[in-house]
Image (cartoon, helix red, strand yellow):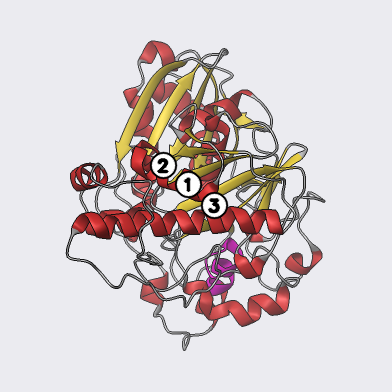
Amino acid sequence: MISLGIDFGTSGARAVAIDAAGKTLAEAKHVFTGSKLATAPAQWETGLFCLLEQLPLELRQKIEAIAIDGTSSTVLLCDATGNPIVTPLLYNDDRGIAVMDELRAIAPPHHVAIGATSSLAKLLWWQKARENSEFGIRNSELINHAPPTTHYGLLNDQFLSPSQEAIYFLHQADWLSFLLHGQLGVSDYHNALKLGYDVERLCYPDWLLKLPALPNLPQILAPGTPVGEVTAEVRSRWGLPQGCVVRAGTTDSIAAFLASGANSPGEAVTSLGSTLVLKLLSRTRVEDARSGVYSHRLGDLWLAGGASNTGGAVLRHFFTDAELETLSGEIDPNYESPLDYYPLLKAGDRFPINDPHLPPRLEPRPENPVEFLHGLLESMARIEARGYQLLQQLGATPLRCVYTAGGGAKNAIWSQIRARHLGVPVAQSAQAEAAYGTALLAQMSC
């Protein structure tokens, strides 16, 4: 069996095809160009099919299953044909801070959906924005009138007018999967967690369904569940075989966990990408919205964790990749930097301090760039350690080891600094690509 995993991150997309034994057969990569959100769906669509095109035809003809992961809480509204009608809101978009009072009044205390960047906060923001012209935006900012520029032509030519109602609320992975299987309104319980879906009872809670004027919320399946075969158009255009099934997907950080090789309670994965994401495999579920802690269901176990806005995006703001490599080599990882930063590019963090107003702390800044980088890496390691300590204080299974995924996993000095703070072994993940984890998901139900 050949399965294909597709990972959509913040700067691009990747695909990995594997056989039944887990051997990588082919890989593909697509980098997003520009940064205009108005063209995001078109860029996603183009990226999706560019990845397929890069795979050898003889391999595409043998793919039996496909799964897609996307960035958590990246969402969009679509019409009845799946055409995006608003500019998507990305994973780190915090405009939901404007509806926090309404959110707290709706959701149970300390619920995971109570957060400025949650899927539910974005849905409420959209609702309020459409209803209240005094809400601080113009209709022209809410509705994207320009049709996407799409090479493959699977999107409709026109967006809806502002007077027409949205039909479907979808996550990034949901919409991309729809482009393959054609069944609109299907999601998975990893992506739907921050929408308010009850992952223990496996249903939408009554308090969510009672909200007025909701769009069609997606049907929720377990990640890895078959949704449907690829459409005849997709099969014909890209040479996929009859019977190729698209399965319900997951989020990018969970895909990274699946790729890591971690499989026992107490094992964890830290994803060092643009942001810092922690996932600890636990026998118990822990939740604490006050500190941004939540747990994803993973079979009979739980992935407890959180996501901080610190991470690689901050490092790349100050240093090029070449500078990071060179300067890191001059750092003594056994020496603790006295610089105490909270490295953020703008105010607000989600975990282990859940405060949308938390100010960045990047002073004092020494003249020596090696010292400055050391202070940044040291401070991020402190935030990571604080996060794992918090998870265990809340009742998660004690930490035994940490696998590292993402671009930061390549920095050996940073890994040594992190190991000093974590007090457990730190190793690179078995597989570096989140797409590999999604390919595994395509092979099995999770």
The residue mark sitting in front, 3 or 2, is: 2
Q: On the picture, is 171 further left or further right than 107?
A: left
Looking at the picture, does residue 435 appear above or below residue 22?
Answer: below
The magenta segment: 116-126
The span from disc 3 to disc 2 (Cα, nearest Å) is 36 Å
Looking at the picture, does residue 356 appear above or below residue 398?
Answer: below
Task: Give amino acid for label 3.
Answer: His
Task: Give amino acid for label 2.
Answer: Gln
CB within 8 Å, label 1 to label 2: yes
Q: Secondary structure at mark 3?
A: strand
Residue 231: % across, % down: 52, 30
Q: Which residue lies at the image location 26% right of the left edge and 60% below the top edge?
A: 372
State the count of labels.
Answer: 3
Mark linked to residue 416: 2
- Which residue has dot 3 on it? 171
Residue 407: % across, % down: 36, 41
Residue 378: % across, % down: 39, 55
The quarter of the picture where the C terminus appears is: top right
The span from disc 1 to disc 2 (Cα, nearest Å) is 6 Å
Q: Secondary structure at mark 1?
A: helix
- Which residue has dot 1 on it? 420
Q: Main secondary structure of the magenta part?
A: helix
Q: Which residue lies at the image location 47% right of the left edge and 35% below the top edge?
A: 434
Q: Is residue 445 magenta?
A: no
CB within 8 Å, label 3 to label 2: no
The span from disc 1 to disc 3 (Cα, nearest Å) is 37 Å
